[in-house]
Image (cartoon, coloured by chain):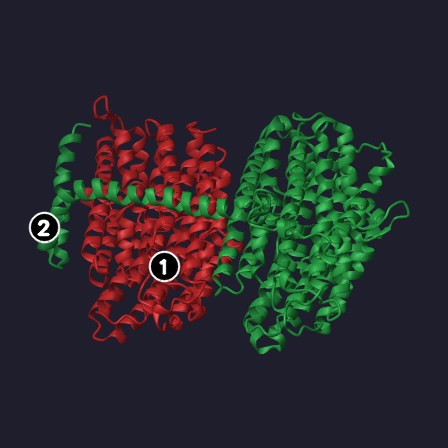
Amino acid sequence: MAGLISLMILISLAGALITFLAKTREQARTVAIITSGISLAISLVIFSQFDSSISTIQFLESYSWIPSIGVTLKFGLDGIGMPLVLLSNIIIPLTVIFAWGETKQANRFYGLILLELTGVLGVFTSLDFFVFYIFWEIVLIPMYFLISIWGGPRKEYAAIKFFIYTHVASLVMLLAIFAMYFNALGITGTPSFDMFGLLKSYQVMDGDLIKGVISLKDAVFIGLLFGFIVKMPAVPFHTWLPDAHVEAPTAGSVILAALLLKMGGYGLFRVILPILPYSDSPSRMITLMAIIGVLSILYGTFLALAQRDLKKMVAYSSISHMGYVTLGAAALVPLSVSGAMYQQFSHGLITGILFMSCGVIQHSAGTRIIHDLGGIAKYMPKLTFVMLAGFLASLGLPGMSGFIAEFLVLVNSYFTLPTFVILALFGIVFTAGYHLWAMQRAVFGTYNEKLGHIHDGANYEIASMAILVLLVIYFGLNPNPVLNMMTVNAEQLLKSVVLRGVIT
Amino acid sequence: MFSDYAALIVLLPVIAFVLTLFLGKKLYSGGALLPIAAIAGSFIISLGIFFEIYPGGMVQQSIPWFGNGISQMNMGILIDPLAIVMLMMVSFVSLLIHIYAVGYMSHDPAKPRYFAETSLFTAAMLSVILSDNILQFFISWEVVGLCSFLLIGFWYHKPSAAAAAKKAFLVTRIGDVLFLAGIVMLYVNLVEIINNPANAFKIEPGNFLLQFKTMFEAIPLIDKTQLTYITLLFFGGAVGKSGQFPLHGWLPDAMEGPTTVSALIHAATMVTAGVYLVARTFPMFFATPATIMTGVPDSLLIVAIFGGFTALFAATMGLVMNDIKRVLAYSTVSQLGYMMLALGTAGAVVGAQAVGISLFHLVSHAFFKALLFLCAGSVIHAVGTNDIREMGGLFNKMKITATTMLIAALALAGIGIPFINIGTAGFFSKDMIIEKSFEFGEKTGGWGWIFYGFAILAALLTSIYIFRLWFMAFTGKPRSERHSHESPNVMTVPLMILALFALFFGFSQTGFYGYLEKNFELMGVEIAVHEEAAQLPVIIILLPVIVGVLGFLISYAIYYKRMIDMSKIISSENPLYKLLLNRYYEPKIGADLIGVKLTHDVVAQSGEFVDRKIIDGLVIDSIIGNTIFKIGEIIRKLQTGVVQNYASITILGVALLLVLLKLKLGGV
C-alpha cells in the first residue's frame, strides 16, 4: 500500500503520460487540471495532518529498489519540504488554468507541465540521494522542451544554455554525492544512498582532493554548493536565467521561477546547512555564501533597473530575491533561516503573478519592451490591478508575504552578518525603484496609440493571478501555517551549528 | 465600553475599503457613504475612548503574531493620551474631507476607486497611531505610503501624476529603509539585552519584544551610542514621511492628485506620521547622550537642526510659487519643520512637555491646513486653474471660501493678541514653539541661538506667502473670463466647521499640554522635567505676532495696494528668484542626476555591460560556448528530440565519472 507522497507523485506521473496520449486539446487540458487538482488535494490532506511542532520526518515511506548499490525509494516530509510541496501543488494547477488557451501541441504542453510537477515533488520529498538526483534531472528535461518548442525567437540558444548550465552544475553535485557515498561505503561497508546517513558520514570524511590545495571535505562542500547556487541562481552563475525566461513560454517561466529555482534553495537547507559546521573552514564558507547572497541581491537589483524588456526585468528581480535565501541561510540564526525558507515560499507565489503579467501583456500588446508600451492601464484595468498588487508584493510591501520573509532575514541576519545586512538594506530603495519605474512607463501615463487596439487579460488568466494575489496577502498577514514548521526545522538544523561553536 | 471595540477604529475603514472597491459602482456617489459612515464610526469610538480614559487611563490590547520565543512579534493596540488626540484629530479631519469630496469629486468617473483608497489611507494612518509595537507601526506606515502612491497617481493617465506618485513612494522609501535599519538595530540590541543574564531583563508574559513598552523599559540597558544610531535612523524615516530637508521634494509634487487627497496627506493621514514617530519614541531620543552640546541629547539636537532648517528653507520657496497648492505644500513642509523643531528644542528645555507642544501644533495645523487645502480646492473647482496669477477678485463671488480661507491664513500666520491670550489656533501653537527655541538659546547660548533665528524668520516668511496667496486669489481684478461661483453646501459646510476649529482650538492649550505631559509616565518612563518657569522678555512674547502682522502688511502693500512693482524682482535675471522658483534645483539633482543619470545610466547600465559582455560574452559564450556548447550541439543533433538518447549519454557520462571516482577513492 503506497503512502500519500508516492501516491501524489504517481498520480502526477500517470497524468502526464495520459496527457501525452490525449487526442484533443480539450482532453489534454481536462486531464491536466484534474490531475493537478487531485495532487493539490492530496497535498492539502498531508498538510492538514502534518504536525508542525516536531522536526522529524513525517509521512515516511521506504521501498527497496536497487539493494546491491544501496538505493531505496525513500520519501518523507518535514518543515523544509512540506511548504514547497504545497507551493508546487498551488503553482501547477494555476499554471494550467493560466495556460488554458494554449493551442500548439496541447497534449505535449500540458503533459510536460505535469511532468515538471512529478519532478519537483520528487525532489522535495526524496530522502535517498540517488532518487533525489534522478528527480533533479527529470525536472530539467520538460523545461528544456518547454523552452525549445514553445519558446521565442532565440529559443534554441536559450534552451541549450539553460540545459548545459544547470546540467554541468548537476554533474558537479553528483560527483560530490558520489564522494560522500564512497566515503560512507568505506566506513560502514554497506552501500547506502540514504540522504541523512550520507550527510552524517560527511562529518568523519578526511583526506585531500589535491594535497595542500583543497581538502576532500571542502571540495565536496563546494561541489554541492555549486550545484545548488547555479540553480537558484546566484551571481555570477546566473546568466542562463534571463535568457531562459525571455525565450520561455509564460507557463514555463512561471514554473521555472516559482519552482525550479526553489530546488536550489531547498538544497541549501536540506544538504548544505547540515554539513556546513563540519566543513574544514566553516567561517570561510559562511562568508562565501554571504557574499554570494548580498551580491545577488544588489547585482540583481541594478541589472533589473537596466532592463528594457519587462520579462527580463522580472527575471533579474528573481535573482535579487533569491539572494535573500542565501543570505538568510548563511546567517545561521534560526529565524533568519526560517525567513530564508519563507522567502522561497513567498517568492514562488509572487513571481508567478509577475511572469503571468508579462505573459498577458505580451499576448495582448505584442511586445514586452517597456518603452514601447505605455498607458496600457486604460484598456487593461483588470491586469493593472493584479499586476500592481504583484509588483508591490515583489518590492516588499508590508502586509504581503515578501515583507515577512525579508524582515525575518534582515533582522535576524544582523546578529551574525551585520555588514552584509547593511549592504542588503541599501538595495531596498532601488528594488522599489525599478518596480515602480517600470509600472510608470509601461502601464501608467498616456496610452501609446501605436499599440493599436489591445484587450484585457482573459478571465482565466486574471483569475489565476488573483488567486495568487490573495494567497500573497493571506500569507503576508498570517505566516504561521507555514512559518511555524519552518522555524521548528531551522532550530533543529542549527543545533549542530551551536554545538560546533561555529557561531555563538 | 468603547475600548472593547478599539480595533474597529482601524477595521471599519478597512471594511469600507473592500466594499467600496468592489461594490462602489452600484452605490450612490461611488459608494462614498460607506467610508464616511466607517470613519464616522472610528471617530465616535475614538471620542468614546477619550472620555473613558480621560484623564489618566490608557488602553492596551495585544495578541501574538509570528516568530517564537523572545522573538515573538505581536499585533496590538496602545491608546494613551498621545494616541487618542491623534486618533480623534485624524478621524475627524478625514471625515470632513470625505464629506467635502462627495461634492468635489462628483464629476469623476473613478469615484469608487477614489473613496476606497482614501478609506484605506485613513485606516492605515489610524493603525499607525494605535500600534503598540514598532513593527506594526512600520507596516501601517508603509501602507500609508502605498495609499499615497495610489492617490497621488489617481489620474494615472497623466504622465506628471504617474511620475509624482513614483517620486513620493521612492523618496519616502529612502526614509523607510533608514527606519527599517533602525528597527533591525533595535531588535538586535533588545534580544542581546534579554539574552545577557547579567541584565536580568525579561519580557513579562503578555508583553512582546518590539512593543513600545518593552523598548522604553530597556532604554537604560541599551548602549548609548547604539541608542543614538537607532533614534537617528528612526528620525531618517520621519524625515522622509514628514517631508523634511533633504527628502522634502516629493510633497510639493504630490499635488498631482485630487486636492482632497492633498488635504488628507497634508493634514491628517500622512505627513504627520513622521512627527508622530518621533513623539512616540521620544523617551529614546531624550535618553541619547549629549556629546555635541551640553545638556542637549544628541538626537534631539539633530531633530532640531533638521526641523529648524526645514521650517525656514521651505518657507523661502513658498514665497515664489504660483501654483496655489504648491504654496500650501511648501507651507506644510515648513510647519512640519516647526513640529520637529519643537520636539528638539523644547525637548531639551522642558523634556516630555515637548511632545505636547509639538502635538498641539500638529493638531492645530491639521485644522487650518486641511481648511486651506479645501478652500484651495473650492477655488480651483470654481476657476479651473491652479495658478494664482490667473485668479483674483474672487471675494465677492465666493464669500464663504474667501472668509474661511482668511481665517485659516490668520491661523497659519499665528495672529492673536498676546497677554490677554485671544487668538487663532496657530497663535497658541506656533508661538509656543518660537518661545521654546528662545529658551533653548538662553539655555545653551552660542550657536544654539540659531534655532530662534530659524523660527522667527520662518514666521515672517509664512505670513508673507500666505497673505500673498490670499490677496492674489480673492482681491483685485478678476484675471480670467470664467464665471466663478461658490461651491455647493456639501463642500462649504466642512469649510465652516474647520474654520471654527482654526479659530477656537487654541483655547484648549492648557488642558492639552497638561493631558499629554503625563503620557510617558503612564508607561512607566520617567523623564526629568526642568521646572524653572522661565520669565521671557516682553519683546520675545510680542515678536511672533509682530512678524505675523508685519508679513500681512508687506503682502497688503505689494499685492493689494500694488505699492511696489514686483516685475523687476520676479524676473529670470534675478538669480535668487530663479533659485527659489527652481526649488533650489532639488528636482534636477534628485530625480535627474541621482535617479536617472547616476543610478540608471551609470551604475545599472555598467552592470548590464558586465553581465552581457563580460560574464556572458567573455566567460560564458567563449569559454563554455567554444567547448561545451559544441558538445551540446552534438548532443542535440544526436538526440533529435528523443529523450532516450539524451538519457543514455547522461548515464554514460555519469558512469564514466563513477569509475574515475572509484579509482580515486577506492582506498579510503
Query: Which dot marks residue B134?
Result: none
Residue in the image at 22% along x and 35% along y: A179
Question: Where in the figure is residue B199, as x and y percent of width and height?
Answer: 64, 28
Q: Nearer the viewer, residue A490 or B445?
A: B445
Outermost right residue: B420
Asked if A377 appears above or below A396 in the picture, the reply is below
- Between the C-alphas of marks 1 and 2, the distance is 39 Å
Q: Chain of mark 1?
A: A
Palette colour of chain A? red
Residue in the image at 42% along x and 60% along y: A44
Question: Where in the figure is residue B103, as x and y percent of width and height?
Answer: 66, 72
Going by the numbered disc 2, the residue's amino acid type is Ile
Residue B458 found in image quarter: top right
Question: Where in the figure is residue A39, as x and y percent of width and height?
Answer: 35, 63
The answer to whether residue B1 is visible is no
Question: Where in the figure is residue A233, as x and y percent of width and height?
Answer: 31, 45
Q: Are marks 1 and 2 on the same chain?
A: no
Query: Which dot marks residue A371?
Result: 1
Instruction: Return the residue at label 2.
Output: B634
* Mark 1 neighbour class, 10 Å CA radius: few under 14, some 14 to 19, many 20 or more: some
Residue in the image at 67% along x and 60% along y: B373
Chain in green in the render? B
Tell me the mark number nearer the camera, choosing from 1 and 2. 1
Q: Secondary structure at mark 1?
A: helix
Going by the numbered disc 1, the residue's amino acid type is His
Q: Chain of mark 2?
A: B
Q: Relative to A453, is B533 on the left or the right?
A: right
